[in-house]
Amino acid sequence: MDRKTYHIIQLLFKYYRETLGVSEKVELDAWLAEDERNRELLKSYEHFSRFVQDMHFYGETDVEKGYDHVFRKIEIQQKKKVNRMRWIGWGSVAASLMIMVTFMILWQQGSSEREQHPMIALASPDRSGVQLQLSDGKTISLAKVLEVKETDGRNVATNDTTGIVYQNMQEDILREEEIKYNTVITPRGTEYLLTLSDGSRVWLNSDSRLRFPVTFAKGIRRVELTGEGYFEVAKDTASPFIVNSGELEVKVTGTSFNITAYPDEEKIQTTLVSGSVDVSCPDYSDVGSVSLVPNEIAVFVHGTQKIEKNQVDITPYVAWHEGFLTFHDESLGSIAKKLERWYDLTFEFDQPETKELVFYGSIKRHENISQVLDMLRCTNLIGFTIIDSKTVRVTRL
């Protein structure tokens, strides 16, 4: 499926769920105005939304029957004797849309399926384990403090239910050795929002850490990320903001972007939401820098000494910080790693090929893991066996 087709599907999908943003509605209206066939597709789609209501019945009584029912509908639609040239491209959108919405319905209607096939209880992750390491190495739990004091006794930050906020101390720090560093550590199953002393905000994903100055020195703002973080950088053209992640360096002045840099992943990804960033690899002189504009991604694969740039739909890369797990053409192996970090589990696969299965989908990030597994199981492609409270075996059906 090409990117344009998928984007249209996304807009129609949101239209059905009544979650279109203002700019997305303008974009959908413009697409509808382009061609009569687009408007005909929307009419077909509105008719399909009534058909989806029937899916609730099939989903509640027999998931497989509901699933088969949808694909019979698709098959019938494809066999209709219409002007085939007229529907090249639009047919793929319609069929793909039906499949995606069907998955959503099946996932949302899995309650009776879960009742019929109760799963062994999986342990819930401890989501209160976020820690802060002070400049002297002392570690404190952020679940237990309201104010953060540095080694000299000064209050440098406040902490509440929304996250930790560092104060702008307005100090004249001129030398690197004068800077005091703190580190926020998010174990598996946790996430955290911190506001740095310059006003920049960082959403830190699970199994991650961010090392940062309590107060930035003049002329440069530098932090170190391991894991994944979503950044909204306060604009300051006189003091560039630099993120070091493994072998990569991301340089900005004021922008929004996401970095994924887990040590157990083969690549580091930088996805730009707004503004501009420069991505480079200082350790390798022969690797040039890459400049990104919104909706582009820079990918560095370890060992290749090369940064590749591509245009992407940024949704699956940034949805986590908005409370969703979103997968677009993503392998089961990649999905499993995300679930392992968020739910503090381990997945075992019956064969390497099972990891290569590809899925689309989106689910609220705070759903119970049993619900997530049931949703994936409703595709009738994979099955799960609970080995113990922390281990799940995946089998291809």
Image: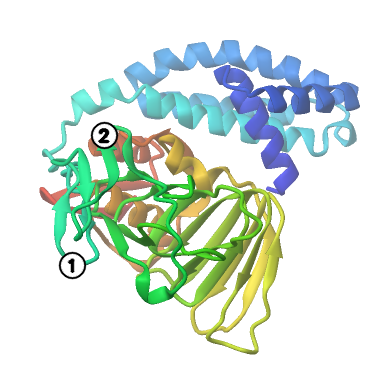
Q: Is residue 59 left or right of residue 46?
A: left
Residue 194: x, y in percent?
A: 37, 45
Q: Residue at x 19, y 31 (%)?
A: 117
Look at the numbered discs 1 and 2 and tell me whether their residues touch, using CB distance below 8 Å: no
Q: Secondary structure at mark 2?
A: strand
Q: Determine which quarter of the picture holds residue 394.
A: bottom left
- Of 185 and 19, nearer the camera is 185
- Tell me, yes or no, if residue 328 can be seen here: no
Q: In the image, what residue occupies the spot 59% across and 28% down? A: 98
Residue that numbered label 2 is attached to: 160
Q: Colour mode?
A: rainbow
Classify residue 336 as left or right of residue 37: left
Give the answer, above or below, for where 381 lies relative to 264. above
Who is closer to the viewer here, 193 or 110?
Answer: 193
State which tag comes first along the sequence, 1 or 2: 1
Compute the Cα span from label 1 to label 2: 22 Å
Q: Position of residue 207 (x, y in %)?
A: 29, 57
> Label for residue 137?
1
Other residues around mark 2 within 10 Å, as few (<14) / some (14–19) / many (≥20): few
What amino acid type is highlighted by mark number 1?
Answer: Gly
The picture places residue 197, in percent across and down from the top left corner, at 42, 50
From the viewer's perspective, is residue 85 above or below residue 283? above
